[in-house]
Amino acid sequence: MTNLIDIENLGKRYDGFALAGVNLAVEPGCVVGFIGSNGAGKTTTLKATLGIIGADEGTVRLFGQAVTPGSAALDELKSRIGVVLDTCAFPSTYRVRDAGLVGRAAYATWDAALFDRLLNTFGLAPKKKVSELSRGMGMKLTLAFALAHHPELLVLDEATAGLDPMARDEVLDILRDFMATGERGILMSTHITSDLEKIADTVACIDGGRMVFTKPKDVITDEAGVARCRAAEVEALLASDLFAPGALRVMRHDYGVDVLVPDRFAAARALPDLVVDKATIEDYMTLMLKGESR
Amino acid sequence: MKTMIVADFSTMRSALLQLVGICLIIAVFMGVVADTVVGAIAAITAMLPFMFLFSLAATDEQNGWERFRLTMPITRRQVVFGRYASLALLTVAAALFGLLLAAVIIGVATALPAGTAPAGLTAEANPPALIIGATAGTVVVIAVGSSVALPLITRFGMTRGARIVPLVVVLVMSAAIGFIGDGAAIDSALAGLVQWLDTGNNYLLLAVAMLLVVAAIYIASAFLSAKLYEGREF
């Protein structure tokens, strides 16, 4: 089956920043979490994916077709995508219903009844001005807009940032409903890694414009672990030959040493006295980015 | 292009409604105090499109609206042409509104007993050719101004464009004055022009010719903007 997104060797150069060799894929039925620190290249990657900027190197394919910025073919591809950015982008003078007017003009597949239903579900009054919406309500309006033309793919850039936990859970429920058909997909850039633990299938991490890892979420949160070590335990772990060279990440704190191990069960079996916690996505990312490779 | 027009008019709808009210007040004020219909029409016809243009350009930069719009199935070319179309539609509407308002003011002033309304508001003082010519002249000024401002705003955005547009306007005017020559030459040319305009239907003839020329300039400006917008990074 054709991937919804295929990014191969993507490169883009700016003064003081370069995106290089980025590879990323979103398969049908898959939610891909895209993480990394501020300025790592997430938004640049998403902009290139949507054809808002042109790539200097590499290729981006949406639904199997190459993305050429400015082309009419890209319009057809974009009509199959729903996008939610980190703010409600509609002009503050808009009323909620105005977003529906724009949607109807922009998308041949616009479903006005669905948009109205979503507004109703989200508690958004059509006559309310965008300037009067809270951040959470603004994001729900953007989400309603993104969903009301029956997209096959959602691209979210920090869509849950700034939302309270209740609102974030509501958004995640909406995304789960969206994924219920099994053929759709989501590419979700976020700093809130706990959201990805609830919904992602794959997690991809970028840093300094380069991909650091792309792993199934379960490999991170179920298999990997963080060994909380004293100095002597670190040496024992490193000397154990349990893992291939370079597979461990070691980060020293004032109060001990954290070691990221790819298989926490193997580590616990080999060193029964060692405390090995399940890794969170945040642990995994932090240790992969800041830990010393051993 | 339709998406842009809908988006632009949705953005400006409430502001336009307020501005129409303000225009009515200005028209009455200028008519009664300044004793002129032509001035009132020119003010209305110019104010609405310029306010529309700069407000839209400012809105583009708020909350990433310009970037978000590009995630919809709309090409950059359509964004630019849509913006030009929105402004053209608004300019035509403003001109028609100005003409309608002029007709109402002149009609009321003429219907009132002699000496009640200012003489400058009556039909005798405002022949149709003068009203239409003044409206066309204002449209020409707006179209030329927009043709200069839009490519700069399209390329640099409103924030930087607002600094560059006045600079370019001053440079163009300085160059034009330098090209035309000294004040005496301008006075002489204007006197000749006025004399020619007062002959037959030359007033309307010039208005139509100017509208055709600025329409061509406006279209050329749209293509230039589209080209410049292709290279814009977000």
Image: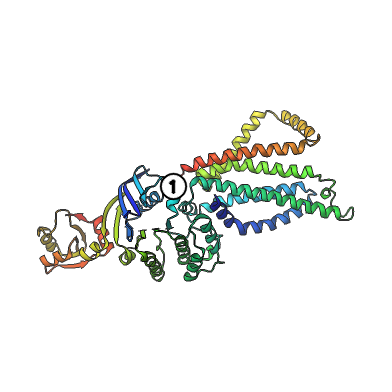
Task: State the residue in front, B175 or B148.
Answer: B148
Q: Is residue B192 visible?
A: yes
Q: Residue furthest front?
A: A1
Looking at the picture, how far across and down is residue A275, in whole percent? 17, 68
- In the picture provided, is A172 more to the left or to the right than B197? left
- Residue B116, by quadrant, is bottom right
10 Å crowding of disc 1: few (<14), some (14-19), many (20+) = some
In which chain is the residue bearing label 1?
A
Task: State the residue in front, B3 or A137.
Answer: B3
Question: Which residue carries the number 1 mark?
Answer: A73
- Residue A220, by quadrant, is bottom left
**SS class, disc 1:** helix
Looking at the picture, how far across and down is residue A145, in whole percent? 47, 61
Looking at the picture, how far across and down is residue A230, in whole percent? 15, 64
Q: Is residue A40 visible?
A: no
Badge 1 amino acid: Ala
- In the picture provided, is A28 more to the left or to the right than B54? left
Looking at the picture, how far across and down is residue A201, in whole percent? 29, 62
Q: Residue furthest right?
A: B114
